[in-house]
Amino acid sequence: MLDVKVLGGGCNNCKMTIKLVEAVALEKGVEIGLEKVEDIQEIMAYDVMSTPGVVINGIVVHRGSVPSRDKVEGWFSLE
Amino acid sequence: MLKDKRFLLVFGIIIWVLLYASLIPLSEKIMSLLPFDSTSHLGEALAFFLYDAPKVLLLLTGVVFAMGIINTWFTPERTRSLLAGRSLGLANILAASLGVVTPFCSCSAVPLFIGFVQAGIPLGVTFSFLIAAPMVNEIALTLLFGLFGWRVALLYLGLGLSVAVMGGLVLGRLGVERYLEPWVQNISKKDIAYESELNTFQQRINAGALAVKEVVGKVWPFILMGIGVGAFIHGYVPENFMASFMGKDAWWSVPLAVLIGIPMYSSAAGIIPVVQALLAKGAALGTALAFMMSVVALSLPEMIILRKVLTIRLIGLFVSIVALGILMVGFVFNLVL
């Protein structure tokens, strides 16, 4: 199971990112544990300066925008 | 595949240029087909709208595309590493300029702020960035260029940067560190590592296209609305109507415009067409630009977001100093022009 965190203070782009991640994971049949991180101190622990950010298994894989669908598919097809 | 995309890019640029060149004949053609007298109120308003709306949208598409590509070189993380360890003054100027080209959304203001603090960037420098980023951006500059010409756009760029640099320097001198929220004061400094994300030509072009989709896709209704209001004022409000209370002689109109603008929130896209209409009816340029700067640079939503890291006192200081800077810009403009 992949541990996925979406970092961001509840802005519109963060919500879109969560939706996209959920949709792609479902499509690919990849099991994920999705967590929404809204606490600013926790976000900063990942050194992400522009939200939304995406963290998979503790590694920041994306920051600053809603990731493209291609990119998200890339994360889930490595499994 | 890559070749296809390049072809598409060149093709797109040619189409853009052709469209831009045919703006005037096209709008005149459409006007002549419509059953309105071009000297009537409605006719004037329509002619204004038919020419300005497509022109501004076209310019905006081009600039946002180019900026989307430029933005790929300036992530917030890179900007931070460019600013870390520079001397005051120079750092403020650099911060303000980077504020123009670094992608910034006020929803990211807090993580950005903390990220700067962590890197040990002085507060005054951070403020220079935070003032410039929303105020001087490609959308504001494009609209000013499209509606008023390059002189006004350049003046806005220069004066906006000056407000950001001066504001940051003053705030830095005041030693406002003690007015940060306690948890921010306790953040430990750390060395920052900057690794560039690999960006291929293809990725940069895609970023440009994405920016167009996101930005233009989002702001076009506001622009049309703004130009609509502008067109209405253009056609129906009598000439020099604004002169008495927004003209050069009414010195009090500058502070009033700034005060009204502070709580208001609109992107540059929505406010500039209105500013243009005000100008056309006799408002002074300095007053109108001060109003616009105050609307764009200072807003209630951003203050609420920044409240997480700044005490009320510091927010008050921040707003007052920026407002004062804008006020001076307004007066200088009215005096010089």
Image (cartoon, coloured by chain):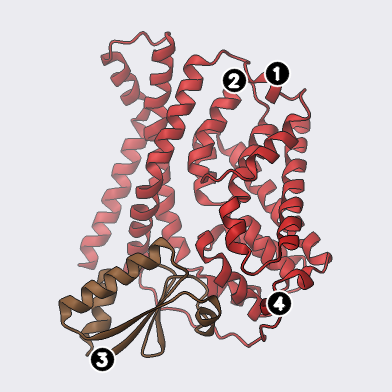
Chain colours: A brown, B red
Name the chain letter of the residue that bears numbered label 3: A
> Mark 3 Cα within 10 Å, few/some/many (few <14, many 20+)?
few
Q: Which residue is mark 1?
A: B244
How far is the residue under mark 2 from the one under mark 1?
A: 10 Å
The image position of residue B264, as x and y in percent, is 58, 43
Residue ID for mark 4: B182
> Which is more toward the observer, A69 or B9?
A69
Q: Residues within 10 Å of mark 4 (few under 14, many from 20)?
A: few
Q: Position of residue B173 (x, y in %)?
A: 83, 65
Label 2, label 4: how far apart the Cα atoms are = 50 Å
Q: Nearer the viewer, mark 2 or mark 1?
A: 1
Mark drawn on residue A1 = 3
The residue at the point 65 percent across, 64 percent down is B95
Q: Residues within 10 Å of mark 1 (few under 14, many from 20)?
A: few
Q: Earlier in the sequence, mark 2 or mark 4?
A: 4
Instruction: Check residue B281 in the rendering and tell me which mark sits there, or answer none.
Output: 2
C-beta proximity under 8 Å, tags 1 and 3: no
Q: Residue at x 74, y 56 (%)?
A: B316
The circle on residue B274 is: none
Q: Residue at x 42, y 40 (%)?
A: B222
- Quadrant of the rendering where the N terminus of chain B is positioned: bottom left
Residue A32 seen in this snapshot = yes
Q: Is residue B44 above or below residue A49?
A: above
Q: Nearer the viewer, mark 2 or mark 4?
A: 4
Do circles 1 and 3 both sit on a common chain? no
- Residue A34 left/right relative to B278: left
**Can marks 4 and 1 be said to lie on one chain?**
yes
- What amino acid does circle 4 point to? Pro
